[in-house]
Amino acid sequence: MSSGQRTRLLLIRHGESEVTVKQIIGGDLACTGLSPLGRRQAEALGERYMQGYEPKVDALWSSTLPRAIETAELLSPSLGGLKVHTHPDLVERRPGEADGVGYKEFGNLFEWTGDFHPHLPLAPGGESLAAFSYRTGQALYELVEGNPGTTMMVVCHGGVIDIAMRLFLSLGMNIQFVLWTLNTSITEFVTTDEPGVWRLVRYNDAAHLDGLPPRTEPAE
């Protein structure tokens, strides 16, 4: 396979969200989109792409959560006005009854032992790490198989990028690691000459955020 035919995935974590500023878990019910800083982060990434040094993007995809869609819509003009396609299985791990619960209250309301048990949900009605991994992996493979030889930008979530690292680097579910993917950072994977083998080009590239505050401090 020549380099011009390689499939390239640009995974973008959404901009800072209102739920993060409010310190609550943001699923379908609680997510209300980006904070003002989150919008500025997305605009900064768009300005980076306008400079013309990044790979040309053929298709723009997004999770269906408002914080991801808003990020993608802010990026679209810098990508030639690409239509934002959404995929429901690119959303963050589904929190079930924890949706909208504060970070500090979560431990008091739900018995949670962490991801070390891959089949335990976050909360009743939520997803386990195993279910989240399967759902996200299927969605990513669906995009890859349906769009060979293209460069796709996928605006998603930190957890989705964690799963992509496991998937494309062939890391098993029992391998524990901690990643902290920055808002609007770029993580890039590209196919290689060996079928089914991907190369990690870069992780957490957030050079465009230089000069911006690292976060919005939550209100007292």
Image (spheres, grey):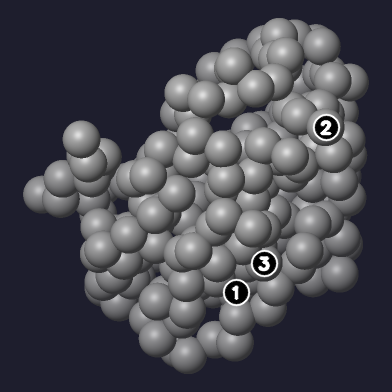
Q: Earlier in the sequence, mark 2 or mark 1?
A: 1
Is 110 or 115 nearer to us in this picture? Answer: 110
Q: Secondary structure at mark 2?
A: loop
Residue tagged 1: 60
Q: Name above or below for residue 139 compared with residue 167.
A: below
Q: Earlier in the sequence, mark 2 or mark 3?
A: 3
Residue placed at 49% from the left, 34% from the top?
102
Q: Position of residue 220 (x, y in %)?
A: 20, 35
Residue type marked 1: Leu
CA gap between label 1 and label 3 equals 13 Å
Whether label 1 touches label 3, CB < 8 Å: no
Q: Secondary structure at mark 1?
A: strand
Determine which quarter of the picture holds residue 219: top left
Residue type marked 3: Thr
Residue tagged 3: 64
Q: Nearer the viewer, mark 2 or mark 3?
A: 2
Whether label 2 touches label 3, CB < 8 Å: no
